[in-house]
Every structure is written in C-alpha cells, then in structure tokens.
Image: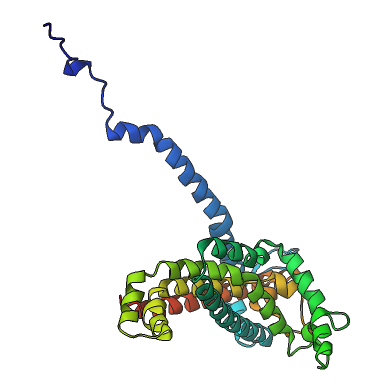
C-alpha cells in the first residue's frame, strides 16, 4: 500500500507574530486614542484652564482683560450672594441625595422580588422622566405647581386643605425643585441599586435565614454591606450632578434669590452682569467644594468596605 507523505513543515502557512498583528491594527487604536484625547482637551482641559486664567482677571467682554491677582477670590468671602447660593446648593444637594437614594433603595428592594420581565418593564416606565427633555419636565411641573388650576392645589382643595403657592413661595420654591429632580432621576438610581442587589449571592441570604435572621437583619447584615460600592457610586455621581444642576433653577426660579444656586449664580455673573472674571472665580470655588465633597464621601465609604 502506498504511503502518501504529508506536507513538510516548510509548506505550512506562516504564523504571524503578535508584534506583526499589533502593528497592523495599532493605527486604529492610535486613532481612537487621539480622537478621545482631542475631545477631552477641547471640552475639558482648555475650558478649565481658561476659567482659571479668567479668575485672575476682570473682563466685561468689551475691554481688554485686566489682571487683578487674587482679588476675585478675596471678594468671595464678603459676597453675601455667594454664600446664599452656596447654602441653597448644600440644602438642595443634601436633601435630594438623601430622599432620592432612600426611595431608590426601597424601589430596588421591591423590584428584586419580582420576575426579571416585570423588573425590566417597570424600570423602563420609571426611567421615562430621564429620557424626557428637561424643558418638558420643568413645564410639566410648573403646571402641577400652578396656584390657580394646578393639579396639586386641585388635590388639596378636594381634601379640604388650603391652596399653596408652591414655586411662588420663597420658603417652598427650593423644595419644589428638589421634588421634581428626585422624580426625574429616581428610575436611574433604582437601576444601579437593583443590579447590585441582584448580585448578592443567594447562598449568603439562605445561610442567614437558616441561622434565624429576620428579613430586616438579612438586609442590614448581608445585603446592605454588599451594595455599599453601588451606593457610593450613586452618592458621588449625585453630588456632582446636583451641584452642577442649572436647567431647573433657570426655568423655574423662585421669588428673589430663594432658588439661586452656585451654578445659576455663575451664569448670572458671567452672562447677565457681564463680570466674567468674578464668575470664573465662583466656578473655581464651586469646583474645589465639589472635589472636596466627592473625596470626603469616597474616603468615608471606603473605610466601611471591610469585605
């Protein structure tokens, strides 16, 4: 019987080295990296550097910028408008984060007991306010808060309670905006927390149940510690988002300065008062406050991650 010789080693297809493969596609990776770097440079680095430069100058868009050293930053300490805006920002951010995180956690816990198809359906409904344009959301809530003909006052009158001024009251306007922001982002926060709750191993919960732990004890001793990273993420992103929020305060302002926050104050200084240098100084101060609050929260949460 004839024996057919197989192909010699020299006839095999050449094996390409990893270096050759990488060199072939390196231009693609470099292109992506360059595009992202250029975007970051244009959208973040240059504007931030310009804001720092402007904070040491006085400029009204007409005359040449005048270098004033640190005078704009020194002015912050005696500016009651800055401190009022900071106080409004702190109150709004603190209450919004606490209420939104608490409601999102309760909603995520309730959804975690449902089948996945119901979870996804309800989360899609709860996230409709997020995909709705911000202007539409503000207009909707302005109608709800109307003193005459508003939905909320109609409900109060139905149950025999007096009508409220809501967004027209200096004492209620800030909290009206807070409630609206909680409504907008509740679904988004619930998605993150629900994903974290679903990742908690069932074996740990079953072991705790066998040990006689109640539902509350299982939540506080097992579920809550394991979802701390997700909660930290929500708190940090909420701090950043609420302190920079501008649209609701611009479109639904309260009487006087009752709803003026740091972001709105920066806009008013730069584009209404035309004091761009001092407005830039306020924005730099807001950045320092925001960075400090974020680092503090991350450090506080990190100390509690003992697993």
Q: Quadrant of the N terminus?
A: top left
Q: Quadrant of residue 190?
A: bottom right
Is 9 positioned to the left or the right of 217 in the image?
left
In the image, 92 versus 64, the foreground residue is 92
Q: Is residue 56 visible?
A: no
Give residue 200's position: percent from left, percent from top.
39, 70
Give residue 10's position: percent from left, percent from top.
19, 16
Relative vertical location of residue 96 with respect to residue 5 in this rendering, above or below: below
Q: Quadrant of residue 241?
A: bottom right
Relative vertical location of residue 63 with respect to residue 239 in this rendering, above or below: above
**Outermost residue, right side:** 148
Q: Residue at x 33, y 74 (%)?
A: 204
Q: Quadrant of residue 166?
A: bottom right
**Outermost residue, left side:** 1
Q: Residue at x 74, y 72 (%)?
A: 250
Is 10 positioned to the left or the right of 295 in the image?
left
**Outermost residue, top side:** 2
In the image, 101 versus 84, the foreground residue is 101
Q: Is residue 267 visible?
A: yes
Q: Quadrant of the C terminus?
A: bottom left
Colour pattern of the rendering: rainbow
Give residue 228's position: percent from left, percent from top.
41, 75
Give residue 59's position: percent from left, percent from top.
69, 68
Q: Residue at x 69, y 74 (%)?
A: 264
The number of numbered discs placed on residues in the rendered structure image is 0
């Amino acid at each position: 019987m004839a024996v057919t010789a197989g192909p010699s080693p020299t006839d095999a297809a050449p094996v390409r080295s990893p270096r050759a493969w990488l060199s072939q596609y390196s231009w693609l990776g470099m292109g992506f990296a360059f595009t992202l770097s250029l975007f970051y440079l244009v959208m973040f680095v240059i504007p931030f550097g310009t804001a720092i430069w402007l904070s040491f100058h006085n400029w009204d868009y007409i005359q040449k910028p005048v270098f004033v050293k640190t005078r704009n930053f020194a002015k912050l300490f005696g500016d009651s408008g800055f401190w009022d805006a900071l106080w409004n920002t702190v109150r709004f951010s603190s209450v919004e984060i606490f209420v939104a995180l608490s409601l999102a956690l309760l909603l995520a816990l309730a959804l975690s007991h449902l089948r996945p198809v119901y979870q996804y359906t309800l989360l899609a409904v709860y996230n409709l306010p997020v995909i709705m344009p911000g202007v539409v959301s503000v207009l909707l809530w302005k109608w709800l808060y109307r003193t005459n003909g508003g939905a909320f006052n109609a409900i109060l009158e139905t149950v025999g309670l007096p009508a409220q001024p809501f967004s027209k009251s200096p004492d209620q306007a800030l909290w009206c905006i807070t409630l609206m922001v909680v409504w907008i982002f509740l679904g988004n926060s619930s998605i993150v927390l629900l994903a974290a709750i679903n990742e908690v191993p069932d074996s740990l919960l079953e072991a705790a149940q066998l040990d006689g732990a109640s539902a509350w004890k299982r939540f506080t001793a097992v579920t809550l510690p394991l979802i701390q990273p997700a909660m930290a993420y929500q708190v940090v992103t909420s701090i950043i988002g609420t302190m920079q929020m501008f649209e609701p305060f611009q479109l639904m302002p309260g009487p006087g300065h009752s709803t003026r926050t740091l972001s709105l104050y920066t806009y008013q200084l730069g584009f209404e008062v035309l004091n761009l240098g001092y407005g830039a100084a306020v924005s730099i101060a807001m950045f320092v406050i925001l960075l400090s609050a974020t680092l503090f929260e991350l450090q506080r949460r990190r100390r509690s991650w003992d697993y």
